[in-house]
Structures are given as C-alpha cells and as structure tokens.
Amino acid sequence: MSVVGRFAPSPSGRMHLGNLACSLLAWLSAKSAGGRIVLRIEDLDAERCPRVYADALEQDLAWLGLHWDEGGSTGGAHGPYYQSERAEIYLQAFEKLQAMGLVYPCFCSRSQLHAASAPHRSDGQVVYQGTCRGMSAQQVADRIAKTGRRPAMRLQVPDEVLGYTDGHLGAYSEHLPTECGDFILRRGDGVFAYQLAVVVDDAAMGVTQVVRGEDLASSTPRQLLLYRLLGLPAPEFIHLPLLLAPDGRRLSKRDGDVSLENLRARYTAGEVVGKLAFAYGLNPSCEPRTPESLLADFSWEKVPKGDICLPEGLF
Ligand code: GLU
C-alpha cells in the first residue's frame, strides 16, 4: 500500500518554524517512501483562520519547495480540503456516534471545568469528570431554557486502556476515563471539534501516515477510539519532537523572528530548509538544501526523540 501523508495546518497566522518542521518531516517521510501528500486546511474555527492565512501558507510551502499532490486550493478527488466547508460530513459521523448512545450534552463552562479539582491530562486540559452525564431530555431542555445557551456535546469514553505504537516515539497508552475523560465532539456554537474532524478527514482523504508535533501524541488515543467507533481504518502515527527557542521556551506564533514572513526576508528557501534539517539531524551541517536533496538520506532514526532546542544564532 502506498503512503499517503498530509499537511494539516491551522492557519490562524503566518507559519512559523515549528509548523514548518512538521510539514518538512511529513513531506520527507511520505516522499522517501514513494508516497503522496495531501494538503488539508484545518480552519474549523473559520473566524480565527481567514482564507488569507491559508493562501499565505500555500505560498510559503511552495516557496520552500514542499509541494503537495492534492488538496488546498489545488483541489482533488477528496475535497473540499478546507475544514470550514466540511461540516455536513462531520455531522454524519457525529450522528452515527449519537445513534450509538455515546454522545451527551454538557453545559459546564470553561471556568467551571477549571475550578473543579479534577486531574489534568498530559496536554494540560482537565480530565472531564462526567458532571453532565446522564441528564434526562427534560433536564437538558430545562437547562437550555434557563441558561439560554446550547450545550457542547461530549463522547463518553469506555473504561479501557487504549494504546498504540508511535512510529518514532514508541509505545503510548492512556486509561481513557482517568487520563483522558469524556471529550468534546461539538462545541456549543455548533463547530465540530478537532478530534472528530481530523479522524473523519484523514479517513476520507485516504491518509495512511500522520506526521505531526509531539504535542498531539496525547490526542492519538481519542482519535483511535473514534476510528474504531466509526469503523474507519486508522493511519500510522508518527510524532516529531517539538522545536524550542534557544532559551528553552516553546516556539509560538508570537515569536515573530521565526515566522515565515521574517525568515523569507532574511534567508533563501534553501537556507531555511538546510538550517531546519540540521536542527532535526537530517543535514550534517547547516548548509542550504532543497527538500528533494534530503530525501535520499532521510531516516526517522536520525531524528532526536526529545525536544529540540534551536541552537543560538542558527536563525
Ligand atoms: N491542525 C493541527 C495544527 O496545526 C494539526 C492537526 C494534526 O496534525 O492532526 O496544529
């Protein structure tokens, strides 16, 4: 079976080096195996992700030489490739889970969730304690009338340990009720949650290999549960170490100096790719490289497993 990888950026701003690292490694991993790359724009939150950012992102990827075979504004057989245009498709999956009796409304506000002395997941979110589970239809109607807001919808997780073997980081598992908790499938404003959308889309787009940042490793058990419940084939998951600023902080879109806007003003595409590949162990020096030139020697074994601190002065 040939590899289908993907870029799945959330364009809420200009790309930065961390996003770029995910794209470069996803591209190298799929292409070195003779595979293809799909570009899916994760603009579920359409207000935070205006189309201008998605367009800038495509230009940045193309500038870097990270070409995709299908998706984005190029289109293809599995479109639309913008999550903001796929709500009907998510609704079908959501209704399937609802019909299984696994979905329930939740009225808890963010502050209520954080006020509860609940354990936290490894991603910093609270493990939901099931406060709203088991409400009757009448109770739900009363709450809607009283609060004037629509509830979020949660999936009830089974009492089991769900694990998988990450293609780079090895074994990872979670006891779903205590380490994950019932999770949101649809927000109160009707927007479908990332966990549901990403599963539905990766399956619908024939993705066989998911390469993404280690911060999403703890989302994988939730996604594997959804694959199973929806009867969809799960891809291989490979998580790459996160890139940290030279002082050890996590890179974010606020680090303007590593945004593509600034990088493009200071370096050639080859310089950016060469330096980034060097930081990930995929270029013996920080000499300029094209993505193609990295293919022959690409191996996940060269990529470190722990967080990568950008060497001072590299960028
Ligand atoms: N859209 C997510 C992000 O940009 C990535 C989701 C994924 O790779 O599963 O962080």
Image (spheres, rainbow, N blue to C red):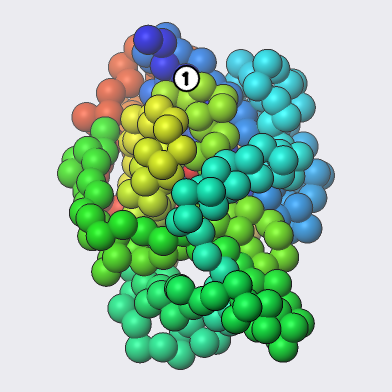
- Residue 273 in sight: no
Q: Residue 139: horizontal and vertical position, in percent?
A: 60, 81
Mark 1 CB lies closer than 8 A to ligand 1: no
Q: Residue at x 34, y 63 (%)?
A: 180
> Which quarter of the figure has residue 295?
top left
Where 122 sits versus 293, above or below?
below
Nearer to the camera, 232 or 35: 232
Q: Residue 114: horizontal and vertical position, in percent?
A: 46, 84
Q: List the residue tagged with mark 1.
A: 4
Q: Secondary structure at mark 1?
A: strand
Q: Residue 145: horizontal and vertical position, in percent?
A: 74, 83
Q: Is residue 169 left or right of residue 289?
A: left
Q: Residue at x 68, y 57 (%)?
A: 191
Q: Residue at x 34, y 30 (%)?
A: 236
In the rendered image, which quarter contains the N terminus? top left
Nearer to the camera, 265 or 26: 26
Where 93 sits versus 38, above or below?
below
Q: Residue 69: horizontal and vertical position, in percent?
A: 61, 16
